[in-house]
Image: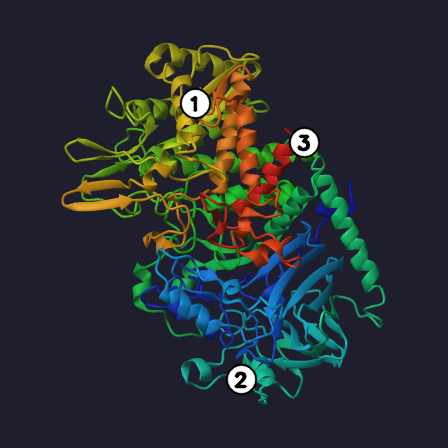
Amino acid sequence: MNKEQQRLQQNGWKKWGSYVSDRQWGTVREDYSADGNSWDYTTHDMARSKAWRWGEEGIAGISDDKQLLCFSLGLWNGKDPIIKERFFGLTNAQGNHGEDVKELYYYLDATPTHSYMKMLYKYPQREFPYQRLIDENARRSKQEGEFELIDTGIFNDDKYFDVFVEYAKGDTDDILISITAHNRGNEAADLHLLPSIWFRNTWVWGRHPYKPALWEESDSAIRISHEKLAVKYLYQEGGGEIVYCENETNNRRLYDVDSNTLYPKDGIHDYVVHETNTVNPEKKGTKAAVHYNLFVPAKSLATIRLRLTDKELKAPFADFDEIFHARLEEADAFYSDVQEGVEDADQRLVQRQALSGMLWNKQFYCYKVQQWLDGDPAGPPPPQERLNGRNKNWKQLNNEDIISVPDKWEFPWYAAWDLAFHCVTLAMVDPDFAKQQLRLLTEEWYMNPSGEFPAYEWAFGDVNPPVHAGATYRVFKQDAAISGRKDYEFLETVFHKLMINFTWWVNRKDSNGSNIFEGGFLGLDNVGAFDRSMPLPSGVRQEQADATSWMAIYALNMLHIALELASYNKVYTGMATKFFEHFLYIAGAMASMGDVENGLWDEKDEFYYDQIRMPDNHVERLRLRSMVGLIPLFAVEVISTETLKNNPAFEKRMSWFLRHRPDLAQLVSRWNEEGQGNKHLLSLLRGHRMKRLLSRMLDEAEFLGEYGVRSLSKTYEKTPFIFRKDGIELSVTYLPGESDSYTYGGNSNWRGPVWLQMNFLMIESLRKFHFFYSDDFRIEYPTRSGQYYSLKEVGTKLAERLLKIFLKDENGRRAVHGDNEKLQTDPYFEGLIQFHEYFHGDNGKGLGAAHQTGWTGLIANLIKMVNNP
C-alpha cells in the first residue's frame, strides 16, 4: 500500500475535510417563511450578517466532521463593496436559466483522507460586477445564453489574482494551510487576505447552551476552546492583524432590532471595509480572522502560511515545507496507482481533477425536519403554514453527516439518484466512503417509514430513478477488486433496505397492480411535453416507459445481488426467484400494456413511448423520441450457467416458471438459448428490437452527437413535437443548450444536451450485451455509415466521444470551454477543467451547474474504461 492507502485504513484521518458548503443562503434548511420561498427568505446580501442554523458556507472551506469549527478564506481588493467571504451567484428567479454561481474557481487536487487538497479562486482586481451580472441576466430571455463572470471582460487584461489554497495534514488534527496569491497583471496591486476561523453557532437556539471560545494567545496565535474538539491553536506567519467578533446575527442590520452582541458576525467585514469599531478590543469571540494587507508586485506572488493544530508549538512553521512536500509526493503516488494504464498526460490531468472535484464536494449536511418544522425554543415559532408545507411528511428525517453532494453551490444538498452515481466514481479512490454513502440513504432516519428514499431537500417526496441497487452492486464489485475480499455484510445490509424501497415502488407507483409504473418526475425535469410531477385529471394516468424500465432494471439489480448473497447464504435463493419473476412480469407488461399487439413499443416508429391512459381505458401514445425511450436498453443482465449450477433451487424454480409462463419467457431475449460461454441473457429487448433501438440511438440525425448521445432526437430541431388535447397545444423542440422551459425552475434541460450519467449507463449496457453476444454480434456505427463493430467496441467509441468534451483536440481546444478564447488559449486557464451538469448537444460546451463533479465525475470511470478495456 502507498501512504494514502495506509491512511485510509486508519481512524481519524477524515475527521477534517472540505466539509464547508459553498452556499448556505437560499437553502430550504434556512427557510422559516410561511410560503416556502427559500431564495427570498435568506439572500447573498444577508449572508455576511446572519448566523446560520444548519450549516456554514465559505470559500475553500474546511471543518471537522461535525462542523463545530470552520476555516475558510476571505478576500478584499479594496474596491468591492463587500469582502469576498462566499461565492456570489444568482437566485433561481434572477437567472435566465435558473440559479447560477457567477465566479471562477477550480478544485485541482485532493486525496480521499484530505491529507492534501488544493483549489484555485480567480479574484478580479477591479470592482466585482455584482449588479451588472444581475441586470444583464435579468435582461436576457430564456432563448439567450447565461451571462457569466468571464463574459463581463473583467479578466481580459489579466488584472486579477490567482489565489491558490492548499491544505496538508501533519496528523489527524494538525492541518497546515498555504495561501498563495499570484498577481497576473502588469501592475502591482493591493490584496487583503482574511483567512477566517469560527464556530458554527449551536448556542443561540435554546437547545445547546454551551458556548465555545476563541481568544488571543499571542499576536501570532489564536487559542481555540471547544469541549468536543482536539484542536487548540491557529498559528499565523507573516504579521497579520488578528481580529475577533461573534458568529451571531447582526439583528440591527437585518431586522432593525437590537443585537445580542456589539460585535456580530459582520463585525470584521465592517472593520476592514468601513474602518468601524466593530471588532472586539478584548480580542476574543467565536469568530476570528487574520488580516493581511498585501502589496503584490506585477507578475509576482505572495504566500501566507497558517497551521490549525492540536499541538502547542514553539516553532509551528519549522517543518511546514517538509510536511507539505511529503503530502504532495504521497498524493502523486496515490494517483499514480489509481491511474495505472492511463498513459496520456491530458487524460491523467482531466481524471485527477475529476476525482479531486468529487472529494472537494463532500459537505457536512445537517437537517432535522421535526426541529425545523417546530422551530427552536429561543426563537419565535415558525408560521403555522409550514406544518402543511414542504417536507411535512418527512419528520423522521434527521440528517447530520458528511455527504457527497452534486455541487456545493448550485446543489448544496444530497440528491438520491445523483448520490448513487457519485459512489460509483468515489469507489475508484475510497470504496469505504462509497459504501458508507450508499448505506446512509437506507438508514431509518433517512428513509421514509413508507420505504421511500428522500429525493432532495426542495421536495423529499419527489421520485428519483431507483438506481441505488445498481450502484450498490457496482460498488460491491469495485471494492472487492481493490481490497481482495467481498464485503457481504455491506451488500446484505443495503439489500434488506432496498427490498423495502422496492415494495414502496410497487405499492405506490403501480396504481392498478399492472406492473406498469407512473414514477412522475424521475429527475428528468422538462423531458416531456408537460411537467410529469403534476397530477393529471382524475382517472387519467401517464404510463411511463422510463419508470417501468427503471423498475425492470431495479428487479434485475436485486436479482443479481440476491444471487451473489445466495452464494454464501442459501436463504437468499428465494429472493433471487422473487426478483427473477418480478422482472418477467414487468417485461411482459411493458410489451403488452393491455394492448396485445404493441404495448409501449411502437412497431411503426420502432421506439418506446410513454402513453396516457384515460378513465375509459383508451390509450393515447406520446410519440416523442427522447431519452425516455432509450432507457429500456439499460435493463440487461447476464447470468452464467455456473451461477445457476451453484444455485440449483433457483434454477429449478426458474425452469418451472418459464415452462408454465411461456408467454413471458418468449418476451425475454433468448432466455432458453445459451449464449457465448454458456451465458444467459435477461433483457427487455429481443435481438431485433435492440438493433432497431440502437439504430435510432446511433443515428447522427437523431440521438448520436459528436460528444455523446443526446437526450432528445435532433429531428425535432426543424419539426417540433406537438401534443394537442382538449384545446391545449404543447410543443417540444430540440434544444442542444440551455432550457427555454420554466419546468423545475428551468435550470436544466433534457431536450437535446448530453448527460454523462445516462451515457455511462448506455455504455455499461452495451458491454453487458456484448458479454452475452460476443464479437460475432456486430452493429452499424454510426447508422448508415457502412461500418460495423461489436457492441463493446461501440461502447468504447461512445466513451471516446464523451472524452472529447474535456480533452484537447488537434488544435489544442477543449469543447467544454465553448468558444471563449480566454478559456481556450490563455496559459492560466486552458488546463483548468470545470465539470458541468450537462453539455451542449452539438458542440459539447459545459452547461448548467459548473462544478457538478457529482455524476459528471463519471468521466474518471470512462477514462479508466477506455484505457483498461
State whether residue 332 is above or below residue 654: below
Residue 823 location, x and y as percent?
A: 58, 56
Q: Is residue 744 visible?
A: yes
Give the residue pinned by disc 2. 261
Mark closer to the observer (1, 2): 1
**Secondary structure category for the residue under label 2:** loop
**Near-viewer residue (198 or 167):** 167
| Alpha carbons under labels 1 and 3: distance apart | 29 Å
| Alpha carbons under labels 1 and 2: distance apart | 66 Å
**Secondary structure category for the residue under label 3:** loop
State whether residue 400 is above or below residue 612: below
| Alpha carbons under labels 3 and 2: distance apart | 56 Å
| Crowdedness near tag 1: few (<14), some (14–19) or many (≥20) residues, C-alpha within 10 Å | many
* Image mark for residue 485: 3
| Crowdedness near tag 3: few (<14), some (14–19) or many (≥20) residues, C-alpha within 10 Å | few
Q: Amino acid at mark 3?
A: Arg
Q: Is residue 469 left or right of residue 663?
A: right
Q: Amino acid at mark 2?
A: Thr
Which residue: 71% across, 73% down? 298
Which residue: 47% across, 28% down? 782
Which of the two discs, 1 and 3, labels the residue nearer the N terminus?
A: 3
Give the residue pinned by disc 1. 683
**Secondary structure category for the residue under label 1:** strand
Residue 529 location, x and y as percent?
A: 28, 44
Coloured how? rainbow
Residue 179 location, x and y as percent?
A: 70, 67
**Near-viewer residue (574 or 248):** 248
